[in-house]
Amino acid sequence: MTWLTPTMQDLLLDAAVETAQMVGLSALVAVVLGLPLALVLHVTGAGQLSPNRLVNLALGGLINAVRSVPFIILMVAIVPFTRVVAGTSIGTLAATVPLAIAATAFIARLFETALREVDPGLVEAAQAMGATRLQIVTRVLLREAAPGLVAAITVTLVSLVGYSAMAGAVGGGGLGDLGIRFGYQRFMPAVMATVVVLLIVVVQLLQSLGDLLVRRLTRR
Amino acid sequence: MEVPIAAPPPLVRLDGIRKSYGRHAPVLDDVSIAVQPGEIFGIVGRSGAGKSTLLRCVNLLERPDAGRVDVAGQDMLALDPAALRTARRGIGMVFQHFNLLSSLTVAANIAFPLAIAGTGRTQQRERVRELLGLVGLTDKAEAYPRQLSGGQKQRVGIARALASRPSVLLCDEATSALDPETTGEILDLIRGLRDRLSLTVLLITHEMAVVKTLCDRVAILDRGRLVETGAVFDVFTRPRSAIARRFVAEVIGDDVPPGAAGRLPPPADHEECRVLRILFAGPNSTRAVISEVSRRFRLDLNIMSGRIDEIGGEPFGLMAVAAYGEPAQIDAGMAWMQGLGLDVTVHS
Ligand SMILES: Nc1ncnc2c1ncn2[C@@H]1O[C@H](COP(=O)(O)OP(=O)(O)O)[C@@H](O)[C@H]1O
Ligand SMILES: [Mg+2]
């Protein structure tokens, strides 16, 4: 382990923290923005609580558009926007902006799918009891979809770990970036291997944690 | 001074209900029913006849294209959204697939209508305990729906529907997902609740057996139109429409076994063979009448089928006989039996 010098240890630690920042922050933004988007998308669907074809098509189209742009292009394309939001176009925070946008579109679709899995009979039963639309959303849709929503967050977190490796392109740092710079460009396969193993462990942990939570929430 | 006893106003009145989806044939075509307070009213029809749509028009889960909906004297179609939500609390609904929230315990499911109405926690707990007792599930309060059998789930569904003390209970195929034994238990429960809580029940089903054991009155819906409405006993013993006869036959069997009429021996010269359907409602003895009519009118009577049954505690006998004899004698025999209060018709 001659390569694991104190300097390299610092680099690895810094990179891990950067990855955690990028993934954590963009996932947080994605959940906060994605959930209302998914709810609007869901309730405006045909035969749902507040059908609205125009809003539904517009929002669905926007989400699809964002999702179909390759991440590396999205990152470059929104640089002006990133500069406004993050104050800079390079660095960890700057990389978080495109990550958050891509993750929001991604998770909104996954959330919507989870909401659609809720038996429409439950909504109907609540309507028959005189529930308001807000009550139906909070007490029926969100509650019954909770396991699916958590599963969607898990999938998003895992995907974000992968995407964050691309953040090196805008100087975002992180584990993936470290692996490329030292492992590939400076030909230190041990660094590359360490990074890969670390990423695998992180992904496994996230997935197991998510699965555990889903099981806890599932009463079916 | 004599005060005329007026019939109470119906608790649920649907008048001239029409509904269609797109340009298809109408799902409901000018349907009118009136459900009296305290009665169990059944609507039967084949799958796709429009039963669920009709039932959903009562609490306006479905808005009719035309017609009037009155529940407990309220013109439902005139209510604004908030008033409609309040009115819906007075109308309980039970579903074929129970529609319980899988994420909530039995107690929380039953409390759900109270929770959304803003009832206090203590009151909720109190009412849930009452309701659990009412449907016989006191020991299942903390269970989750997936841990229950179908019959138990429907008991929860019924308890939930009754939580806000509604005056009307709507049941959409409440027993269609259950086995026959459990169906019987749930039907008993519904009847018991009606008696104890003086509920009014409007149920829909495709099973005539449910109507026979539970309902007071029945309406038959066929392709969106009401073809027959009446007391269950009358519809079972004297069905007027072809479709009513088919539904009745499902439960109490056909009057004349298919093909039996074709196997009858031909009548002698100057004689005729007529298949008669004889209905005995009440205490008349079947056999004495048959042998007496045979003697009096010199008729040969060939019994093709016969059964004694009971609807709503009222016994009746139904018999199909092939009568051989002179036409005038058969006419006279029929008239004589009718004179005794029997219902005699010629089977076509
Ligand atoms: N939302 C809807 N859109 C289009 N057609 C519908 C809708 N709901 C019901 N129908 C049609 O109306 C008819 C009656 O349906 P329903 O009331 O569910 O019948 P039943 O309960 O007697 O089986 C069916 O042909 C069904 O396909
Ligand atoms: Mg139906």
Image (cartoon, coloured by chain):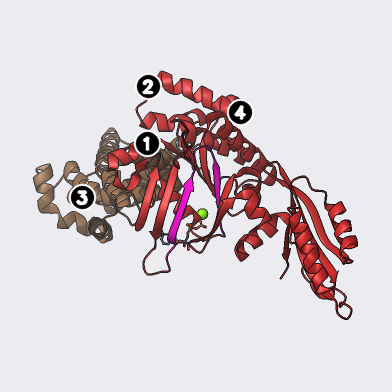
Marks 3 and 4 belong to one chain: no
Work out how far the residue at label 4 is from the one at label 2, CA to CA, in angstroms.
24 Å
Label 2 crowding class (10 Å Cα cut-off): few <14, some 14-19, many 20+? few
**Amino acid type of the residue that numbered disc 3 sits on in the rendered structure:** Pro
Which residue is more in the foreground, B156 or B230? Answer: B230
Which residue is more in the foreground, B295 or B185? Answer: B295
Quadrant of image for the C terminus of chain B: bottom right
Q: Which residues are magenta?
A: B25-45
Shade representing chain B: red
Rendered residue at 58%/32% (across/down): B195
Sequence-wise, the earlier of marks 4 and 2 is: 2
Work out how far the residue at label 1 is from the one at label 3, CA to CA, in angstroms.
33 Å
Rendered residue at 26%/34% (across/down): A10
Q: Is residue B314 visible?
A: yes
Q: Quadrant of residue B149?
A: top right
Residue bearing the label numbered 4? B136
Residue bearing the label numbered 2? B120
User: Count the marks: how many?
Assistant: 4
Residue bearing the label numbered 1? A139
Label 3 crowding class (10 Å Cα cut-off): few <14, some 14-19, many 20+? many
Give the x, y percent position of residue B232: 62, 49
Q: Which chain is brown?
A: A
